[in-house]
Amino acid sequence: MKKCFLAIIIASCGLFSSCEDFIEHEQRGVQNLDNYFQTDTECQEFVNDLYKRAFLHYDWSPLCSSRIANETATDDAWMGNTGQSAEIFIPAAQYLITPNRMGELLNLYKIRYQNIMACNIAIESIPGAPIMDEKKNQYVGEALFCRAYNYLELVANFGGVPLVLEMLSSSEMDKVRASKEEVYQQIEADLKTAIHKVSSSYEDGNKGRASVWACTALLARAYLYQSKWEEAYHYADTTIVNGGFKLEPNFVNIWDVNNPNGVESIIEVQTNTESDKALGNQLCTLCGARGEKAENFPSKDAADVMDGWGWGTPTSDLENCYLSENDEIRRRSTITVYGEPAYGDEELNPSYMFDLEQNKSGRVIRKYYVPIATRRTLFDKRYNAPLNTPIIRLAEMYLTRAEAAYYLGKYDSAMDDVDIVRSRVDLPGKKGTVSGTDILYAIWKERRMELAFEGLRLYDIRRQIDPATNQPVIAGLFGPNGSFVHYNTVESTDEYETSNLKELQDKGINFDINKHLLWPIPQSEIDRSFGQITQNPNY
């Protein structure tokens, strides 16, 4: 009953949904907010649920598919699946998005606020729970972290949004948008408060939970997005120096199902294979190769087939980025090309094959790959894939510190951090070989290669200002004259992409810098606020 109740309360407490009736009327046979939060177990279970719903949710649609929709709006990914209708991804991928046609990004807005309401419930209710103060602080700190994470995703996608910091009643449906600056101020305040409440250690069962270092790392990301270089440098440096994390020696092991919460992971999605719960990683199915066949595996065993849906296939443009640096380790850890061995799983999958008729680029994302030996053990491959996914990891902090150092004039320090990240994948250092703005371009290129398909690329190319044009990087990639559009429509000779035209080759040609630096606010949310919420420009 508790789990059902928690699912109902979180699902029903949307941005402008009311819990008023639920609280005021007596409930028979169920728990309500007056009699919940009475034990440590109840508090912990409620907070546990916040993580899953903030990071990947319990099904593919709410957050996994909106995350991939954002990837398809970059130069890293096609929609990919050319065997099914792509309507849920077309608005973002082809920049045809409108307030009434948002595809999966409609869910992104709604689910973030549902989770924020649940965070608010925890923040308001747990301090009154009859449990130890140390536990109260930890749980409230974790809820503050999750709220900050949700708001960071909202502001990065939509700009200024309504700030909802308490449980709403039906008379409080007239919330207006806060400014982007005000949203960031709230994110910073939540994280700085959380730092003093959460644990500084991952011992004693705290792995996967927000720690001091998860808070400092998310602060570094938030300040980076605002171009506040001193603060971004400080919090990235604090995390690197004091957090006790190390770069994973073997890059591909960051996404190894047998290496959850590895030495590099600051915080990551927790998964498991319990057959009666949907606690697996849905990205493994959503982005898995479509049209795998048992006959293509050495075993000829149907148990080896993952039966993926094929969305978000890597572009040859991204692959070329790795090839230009002779970066085979990160290329093969990020992209598997049709017919290649699955990196790290060469013995059981020596020639990875899938249906090319349903795959735009002849490529799949390696970071979400479930190895054959693990597949054979799964009760349900869609719901039980035990692949933890990093939300923040140490390499991001090195590259954040590097970018901040560049803008602070610490050029040698910036390249030292770049070279630390390159050294892990056996690439030569670049310090002393680049200067001026080429240092900045080197940092940005390293971010692309290191962090591909980790949910950051769209936010990066929107915020990065190209010193050669004084325009956001995304404006140089997309639009009628964009370099990515030109590559695909004029230059590319890629055997897969140019032969499968079921997905248009001119992806990104409709980009308009006057509106597409943010997504539109869903019209349904504007209507629900009785017009109090205003729309983003030019939509």
Image: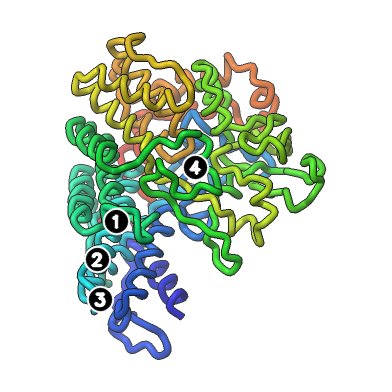
Residue that label 4 marks: 69
* Quarter-of-image position of residue 20: bottom left
Circle 1: element type: helix
Distance from disc 3 to disc 4, alpha carbons, whole Å, reads 42 Å
The mark nearer the N terminus, 2 or 1, is 2
Residue at 58% over, 15% down: 490
Mark 1 lies on residue: 147
Residue type, mark 1 in image: Arg
Q: Evaluate whether residue 85 shows in this view.
A: no
Residue at 41% of width from left, 43% of height from top? 263
In this rendering, the label closer to the viewer, 4 or 1: 1
Dot 4 or dot 2: first in sequence order is 4
The type of residue carrying mark 4 is: Ala
N-terminal of the pair, mark 3 or mark 2, is: 2
Mark found first going from the N terminus, 4 or 1: 4
Q: Which residue is mark 2?
A: 123
Residue 494, position as x, y percentages in the image: 64, 20
The type of colouring in the image is: rainbow
For badge 2, the amino acid type reads: Ile
The residue carrying pointer 4 sits among few (fewer than 14), some (14 to 19) or many (20 or more) residues within 10 Å by Cα, namely many
**Mark 2: secondary structure:** helix
Residue located beneath label 3 in the image: 131
